[in-house]
């Protein structure tokens, strides 16, 4: 469905002058620096996939989404979505696409939600029956009916986001881009939105690409993740693979039955110690946990042992920390 | 697609109805200002009788008409498009399969129709009744006036789009736009009648689109002897086409810029 090849987006940042003549100088100023927000990324996404697009702040996620929606033209590279180049045939492209920018609404600020939906019905020429069916479905899944008559500007953030999602899915788009759809929401609201996205994706086979900083979204929704940093895709694959490849160390938490002076064991290191409770970290690529437990049992008396596998959150924190480290060493 | 524009216009019309109280207050303000301006202009008329071909009655019609059009012509400036460009909200309009100029125009029409019906017309009638001025308008001149009014609002709309589009190129667009608005108000004869201008300026103004926004429907309304209605209407149509093309070109280039440079 989506084929991206060597996509690059560079921004020119002009120097701004202040003061009385600043405005005039700005008009003629050619001094600029170039920021490469997206740096030669390539990927393919099949119809019906639900892909999480992750990366630290400023990685280039939103910029990529904007290119996919056709509102930004790449500096170089190729991109087709369902055979169309988004920015060349923008109107045709946006007809079968939906988008939510979590940071700002795409709804008309001063209209009640229902008026916005009615307007969209005409703009997308949605048949009456389909419109009814979807509105009923959204009332169900998103609780839309609670605030249909409130103007968008007076909605709470969670309500606004739900309205925005409904608007994006109203015309049964083939593909939907969600840029941080859960930003700033409470736990329940997030849960509801995740449920909604999952349901639509499985029932309507809508292709969804989602950026987020909330790893709960990822764990709940995405089988496939793409990770980007400084404009480059550094991982593209199954979420499970990401965890096993980058998850780093597993943890073994041991409650000892007696006091010992030396608790070090081969193949693991101590990361925390709290009274008799000690946390060891070890790499999962070896022989598993059996040798460690044998070793422990041979030398110590213990009361309880528990094992912690890396979850998505720790994995991703781990990856970001590694990248952070890489960058700072680049500058040294 | 027409349905979408119709719906847009209707929604914008309905939105105005929410502000009924503000509307009444608006009529009162317009009326007060109308008296003030009328007496000022009458004083001018007394000092130099026959100035610009005006007499007592036509001064009253002029003031009533201009006060009635403050809202539809967005005399105090209109910055909606400018704001969406600056805030980046414009991006969400790009994500919808609808013509940009058409979308804004539909909304403007909804607004203008409401303001004319609920504010402009009552105000004008009230004004004429208070001053006991009869308005004699034949059916054909009435029709010509309606057409001319529609054209005037459309030309004004394109002009407003043009000065709003400045926001694509400069951060200080609001200043430029406010300037453009004031200049246009003066040149269209909204502040003082075009007939009061010095002769050279009167001639110069006829070469600009501004009379098409206000002065021409006014002339038809007053039915000045020797008014060549068809000529006036065709001048409006001419400027309408020019300004539509200009506004659309600017929007097109501005959009390109946003799309390529990222705002
Ligand atoms: N219009 C623009 N002009 C100049 N630079 C820009 C523009 N848009 C983005 N950038 C720069 O491009 C880089 C990538 O930005 P982008 O918004 O894509 O990041 P992101 O991954 O969405 O980050 P976040 O998680 O914070 O939303 C940043 O360095 C940003 O400053
Ligand atoms: Mg972003």
Image (cartoon, coloured by chain):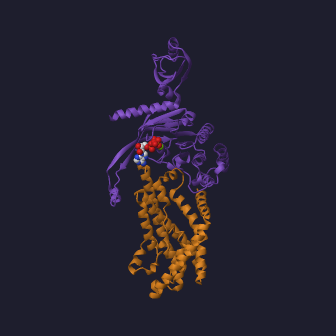
On screen, residue B118 versus residue B239, left or right, reads right
Residue B212 drawn at (x, y percent): 48, 72
Q: How many numbered marks does the figure carry? A: 0
Looking at the image, which is closer to me, B53 or B88?
A: B88
Residue A103: x and y in percent read 51, 47
Can residue A188 be seen at all in this image of the molecule?
yes
Q: Nearer the viewer, residue A276 or B199?
A: A276
Q: Which chain is purple?
A: A
> Of A293 and B151, which appears nearest the observer?
A293
Compared to B145, does A321 lie above or below? above
Q: Is residue A155 left or right of residue A133?
A: left
- Res B209 visible: no
Q: Quadrant of residue B23?
A: bottom right
Tell which chain the image draws in orange. Answer: B
Residue A282 against residue B142 in the figure, above or below = above
Query: Could you tell me which quadrant the N terminus of chain B lies in?
Result: bottom right
- Residue B204 position (above or below residue A53): below
Give the x, y percent position of residue A193.
60, 41
Q: Residue at x 45, y 66 (%)?
A: B242
Q: Quadrant of ligand 1?
A: top left
Q: Is residue B134 left or right of residue B46?
A: right
Which residue is situated farthest in the top direction here?
A298
Q: Position of residue A99 (x, y in %)?
A: 54, 46
């Amino acid at each position: 469905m989506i084929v991206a090849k060597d996509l690059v987006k560079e921004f020119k940042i002009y120097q701004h002058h202040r003061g009385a003549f600043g405005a005039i100088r700005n008009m003629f100023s050619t001094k600029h620096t170039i920021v490469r927000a997206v740096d030669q990324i390539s990927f393919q996404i099949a119809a019906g996939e639900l892909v999480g697009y992750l990366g630290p702040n400023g990685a280039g996620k939103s910029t990529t989404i904007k290119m996919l929606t056709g509102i930004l033209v790449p500096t170089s590279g190729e991109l087709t979505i369902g055979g169309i180049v988004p920015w060349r045939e923008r109107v045709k492209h946006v007809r079968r696409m939906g988008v939510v920018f979590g940071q700002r609404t795409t709804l008309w600020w001063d209209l009640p939600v229902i008026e916005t939906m009615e307007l969209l019905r005409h703009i997308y020429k949605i048949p009456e029956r389909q419109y009814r069916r979807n509105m009923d479905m959204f009332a169900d899944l998103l609780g839309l009916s609670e605030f249909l008559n409130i103007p968008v500007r007076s909605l709470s953030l969670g309500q606004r986001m739900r309205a925005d999602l409904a608007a994006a899915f109203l015309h049964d788009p083939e593909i939907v881009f969600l840029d941080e759809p859960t930003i700033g929401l409470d736990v329940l609201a997030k849960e509801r939105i995740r449920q909604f996205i999952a349901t639509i994706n499985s029932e309507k086979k809508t292709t969804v690409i989602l950026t987020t900083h909330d790893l709960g979204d990822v764990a709940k929704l995405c089988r496939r993740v793409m990770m980007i940093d400084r404009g480059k895709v550094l991982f593209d694959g199954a979420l499970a693979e990401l965890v096993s490849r980058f998850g780093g160390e597993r943890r073994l938490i041991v409650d000892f039955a007696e006091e010992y002076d030396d608790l070090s064991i081969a193949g693991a290191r101590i990361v925390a110690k709290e009274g008799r409770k000690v946390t060891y970290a070890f790499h999962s690529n070896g022989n598993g946990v059996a040798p460690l437990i044998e070793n422990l049992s041979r030398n110590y008396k213990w009361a309880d042992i528990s094992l912690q596998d890396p979850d998505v959150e720790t994995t991703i924190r781990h990856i970001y920390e590694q990248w952070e480290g890489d960058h700072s060493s680049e500058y040294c | 697609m027409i349905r979408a524009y119709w719906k847009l216009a209707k929604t914008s019309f309905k939105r105005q109805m929410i502000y009924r109280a503000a509307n009444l207050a608006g009529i009162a303000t317009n009326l007060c200002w109308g008296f003030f301006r009328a007496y000022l202009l009458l004083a001018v008329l007394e000092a130099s009788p026959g100035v610009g071909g005006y007499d007592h009655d036509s001064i009253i019609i002029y003031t009533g008409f201009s006060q009635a059009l403050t809202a539809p012509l967005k005399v105090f400036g209109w910055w909606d498009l400018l704001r969406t460009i600056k805030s980046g909200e414009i991006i969400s309009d790009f994500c919808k399969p609808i013509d940009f100029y058409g979308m804004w125009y539909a909304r403007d029409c909804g607004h203008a129709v409401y303001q004319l019906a609920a504010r402009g017309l009552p105000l004008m009638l009230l004004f004429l009744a208070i001053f006991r001025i009869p308005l004699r308008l034949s059916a054909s001149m009435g029709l010509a006036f309606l057409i001319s009014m529609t054209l005037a609002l459309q030309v004004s709309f394109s002009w407003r789009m043009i000065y709003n589009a400045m926001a694509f190129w400069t951060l200080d667009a609001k200043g430029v736009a406010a300037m453009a608005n004031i200049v246009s108000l003066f040149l269209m004869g909204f502040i003082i009648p075009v007939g009061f201008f010095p002769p050279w300026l009167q001639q110069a103004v006829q070469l600009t689109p501004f009379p098409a926004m206000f002065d021409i429907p006014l002339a038809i309304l007053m039915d000045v002897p020797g008014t060549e209605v068809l000529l006036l209407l065709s001048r409006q149509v001419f400027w309408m086409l020019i300004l539509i093309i200009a506004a659309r070109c600017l929007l097109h280039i501005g959009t390109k810029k946003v799309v390529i440079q990222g705002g």
